[in-house]
Amino acid sequence: MKTENVFALIVVVLAPCLATVAQTTTATTSPAPTAPAPSEHPAGPGDALAKPAEPSIVAHGTAPEPSTTEVVALTNEPGTDEVLETVVFDAIPLPDAVNALALQAGLNIQFDPKLLNTVGPDGRPVPVTPPTISAKWKKLTAKQALTALLDNWGWQLVMDPRSPIGRITAKDPTALEPLVTTVVQLEYSTPTNIITEVQPTLSTRSSIISDPRTHKLIIRTTERELPGVEALITKLDNPTRQVLIETKIVETTKDINSAKGVDWTGTLAAQHFSFGNGQTVGSIGATNMMSTIPPGTTTLPGGTTVPTAGGGLASATTNVTALTTSIVGSQTAGGLSLNTARGFSPSTAFLNADGVSAVLSFLNTDSDTRSLSFPRTVALDGVQTEIMSVQNIPIFEQQQSAPAAGASQGLATVLPNYDKKVEGTVLNEVGVKLTVIPRIAGPTNVLMDVRPEISSVDAAVASDTLDGQVSTSPIFDRRRITTQAVVPSGYTLVLGGVEIDNTLNSATKVPFFGDLPGLGNLFRSNNKTHNKDNLLIFVTPTIIQDSDFQAGHSQFLKKKDISPSAEEGPWDTAKPYDWTKPNTTVTPSYQP
């Protein structure tokens, strides 16, 4: 295997040192160990393995019996997170392996003295023979190898935030695993949606919160649980596919009317008769009247006439009859009038009627109506989209306010309601509406929840009388289809069946006269009405690919002046023309 792809630990057992170490023994001092002198003989085959050509870290350790030197060869630069092809431990002391991995990972460490020493009978520390390890790992980083090695032997690396040097110590079996905090940046999903999916998988000590402004998740969990949480978020945070929804709504209406003959309904179906001119009432009273005596003559006894002067006042009492006539009801209601002055006479006894009316019809009418709508939208996978072209018809509602002090009832006001809801549906919202929830099923299929609706206002008006007050309300016609279907991408789903076919035949005839041959046509009429309404809806879903989008070439932000206002000419404005300015052609300052 090539040297640059191998992180190898090679244990080389050297021959006993050729140099003799002199030892001096005295009665007052104990023998002191002497470091072996460096060998000066030429390098042999074993020394070639101990010095690799790539940058390396060499760790030396001493075994109790016999004395050996362990060489650790690292082919990657220290302090990197590159994945190593192979990591080999061959009977190397555990502290030396930890040191080599920490150096390769760029970590500064020191060992807890309790790991390498024990307390002797005299209370002094006594070195402990470290265990040796042998292992061969592949495809991992130095940090991953260090973590696996420490966990296997019950050790842990504790980092001090005040110092760049970590401490290798033994784990406390009773202590809880410490919590770590990390921040995950979302790319496609909404933080609240991810929290809903991830929160149930966390332990009771772990927590996850969102930052809507930056689209990030703050996760606080154990180091052992963190990789699984991050992997789950990575799988959920993927781009949402989109679906193009193209719809064609076709509504056809055909009305055929035929009316022939003479209709005598207005004369013979509701003829009103009245007798008399109503009711007459009157009153009689005495009235004192004062008048001036005009000048005249006076005849004396014997026949002589003498003129007299006028100007005097005379008093007289006159009986005045005041008559007031009140017609009770209308002419159609009729009534018998009792005249108290003259009694029953021909002047009050007469017959009133509506008169004679007939309708002559001889006409056919035919009307065809075709309404087309082409709503189109783009929806995210699994997200509801709605297209509307509607008009809100006001419904007037009367509201009664609280009565004021001393008043029996409050003030009544009538207000329009443009959003009248009945069971979640806006009743007075008429027009064309399309609601679609697309779901991509498989590579090319689309599962659609489709709810098209067409509504209108009927020509008839509903009315009701309550406490003598007549209330009216419009009538709304609504047609809706609710269905689910799976359609291949690019194919069309046809929805129909909302077809209305009404036929009405009516006839009128005057008895006896309508049965006469030939002449009976003047006393008969026939009306035929045929209404047919059909609704077809075509829905075509298309899964959008990344190649379907095209980059725009807008220059909007590069314009220095993007004001859309522009001066108009004197022909299009009410301002008087300024003859002091030259006549120039004015163009908008912004050109898209």
Image: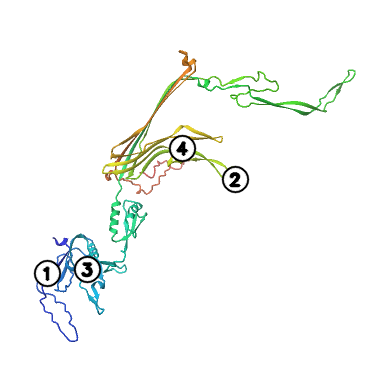
Are there few (<14), some (14-19), or many (20+) residues within 10 Å of tag 3? Answer: some
Residue 369 located left or right of residue 347:
left
- Identity of the amino acid at label 1? Asp
Give whichever of discs 1 and 4 has the lower sequence position.
1
Helix, strand or loop for disc 3: helix
CA gap, disc 2 and disc 1: 111 Å
Specify the quadrant of the image occupied by residue 167.
bottom left
Q: Are marks 1 and 4 in contact (CB under 8 Å)?
A: no
| Circle 4 residue | 393
| Circle 2 residue | 404
Nearer to the camera, 466 or 22: 466
Q: Where residue 165 appears, x then y in whole percent?
A: 27, 69
Instruction: Note whether 40 is above or below 207 in the view shown.
Output: below
Helix, strand or loop for disc 4: loop
| Circle 3 residue | 99
Q: Identify the mark at residue 47; answer none if there is no mark.
A: 1
Give whichever of discs 2 and 1 has the lower sequence position.
1
